[in-house]
Image (spheres, rainbow, N blue to C red):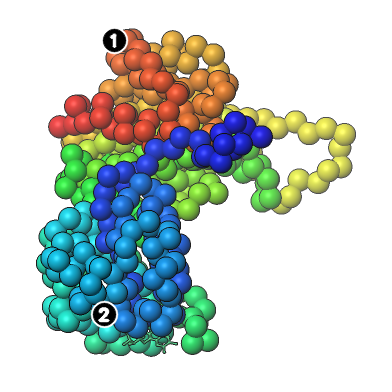
Amino acid sequence: MTNQQHNGKEPEKFLSLNGKNVVLGVSGSIAAYKAADLASKLVQAGAQVDVILTESAQEFVGKSTFAALTHRPVTTGLWEANSPLAIDHVSLAVNADCVVVAPATANTIAKLALGLSDDALGATVLATDAPLVVAPAMDANMYASPAVQQNVETLRERGAVIAEPGKGRLASGLIGKGRLQDPAQIVGLVRQAIGRSGDYAGRKVVVSAGGTQEPIDPVRFISNRSTGKMGYALAEAARDRGADVTLVSAPTALDHPAGVGFVPVQTVNGMREAVLAASEPADLLVMAAAISDFSPANVASEKIKKNGASLTLELQKNEDWMPLATGPKLVKVAFAAETGDAAVKARDKVESKGAVFTVANDVSEEGSGFGTDTNRVAIVDASGEAEQLPLMDKLVVAHAILDRALKHLK
Ligand SMILES: Cc1cc2nc3c(=O)[nH]c(=O)nc-3n(C[C@H](O)[C@H](O)[C@H](O)COP(=O)(O)O)c2cc1C
């Protein structure tokens, strides 16, 4: 047991919503219980969360749950004596960095589309100029109805971010589209909405991530220890600063980040095709993927039998195609995962890959490299100058990389 666990404290983590005020509106859907998890995740991300429950929502979930999770008073009506709205009925709206309605019922969506303000949630949404995230949850037939679709479109046209409901089994017993989006994904959309006018607004960013898999036969492949965490953190960080992000990802165990274009690939060749296509119109390409340097020279069409006492595989070197990624505005950042003296080894890669700098990390160092939530990297530029950064959360490392790349963008 570590000291931190013993003290009951979590290890220090970068809080992506630190200092942000989020108003969470909960309406009367059977999915209202999931809003408690969302409130908790927003708080864990550092946000101050003010919850508004509609009258119907209170049939499903209680005020105390949200008060305990957020450590804040919960608003249940415009006329409550102890609510911040009793003194100033638009106080939550004015202070909000984002208003998120989750779950949003068909009824609440209709009221928001019409601009009704006969309850605390309606008044707050009307009075705020903060971005609005709406996460519908309802029966599939209700969601597909022309009335709901039109109201959702109205909100989208006005700039609301719609957390599209997922497909699956619904409380009605139907299988269809109407399930509340996963709370972790909604948090991603809140982060994106808050950051949409950030310093990467209007920029297209392509990030590659994960370890490619090179087939040996139909059931086996060669890969590496990359988990994709660094690349996913980069995609999320760029999204949170307003970029339009495409994440080209080899297989990983991570969830697709919300609000990010996602292109799944498996092999070096698949990654090459997807990255070259996505890079052409992009402003920035960050190659955080661990691309196999070698692939089996021949891929068996059937599973190789375990007949012999040994098996010799012939591997062929893969061409380094990062230099081929080009576009009129494209700026490139390379990664170099090395064992020992990473910064020195990364120097050569800056020029050969046509990058503005290489992010060098020594994957053999404790707390750094594959699979960890932290990384210790050096930024090595074309002149060979290395800037060593301390061991930090991968999201902080991602922001540090984006800070430096921004200066090079055209
Ligand atoms: C058991 C039950 C479950 C419900 N689930 C949903 C739902 O998932 N989505 C929805 O749009 N309405 C649902 N409704 C209907 C809403 O609660 C109803 O339209 C209510 O007026 C919504 O009020 P509000 O939007 O102010 O919260 C449900 C009703 C009941 C009785």
How far separated are the C-alphas under marks 1 and 2?
58 Å
User: Whole-percent x and y of residue 276?
Assistant: 34, 41
| Label 2 C-beta lies within 8 Å of the nearest ligand 1 atom | yes
Element type at marker 2?
helix
Mark 1 residue type: Ser
Q: Is residue 257 above or below residue 329?
A: below
Residue occupied by mark 2: 108
Which of the 4 image quadrants contains residue 357?
top left
Element type at marker 1?
loop
User: Whole-percent x and y of residue 208?
Assistant: 40, 40
Mark 2 residue type: Thr
Residue occupied by mark 1: 383
Q: Residue at x 18, y 68 (%)?
A: 85
Residue 230 seen in the current view: no
Badge 2 local density, few (<14 within 10 Å), some, or many (20+)? many
Q: Residue at x 49, y 45 (%)?
A: 250
Image marks 1 and 2: residues in contact by CB distance under 8 Å: no
Indicate which label's residue lies in the foreground, 1 or 2: 2
Q: Which mark is residue 190?
A: none
- Quarter placement of the C terminus: top left
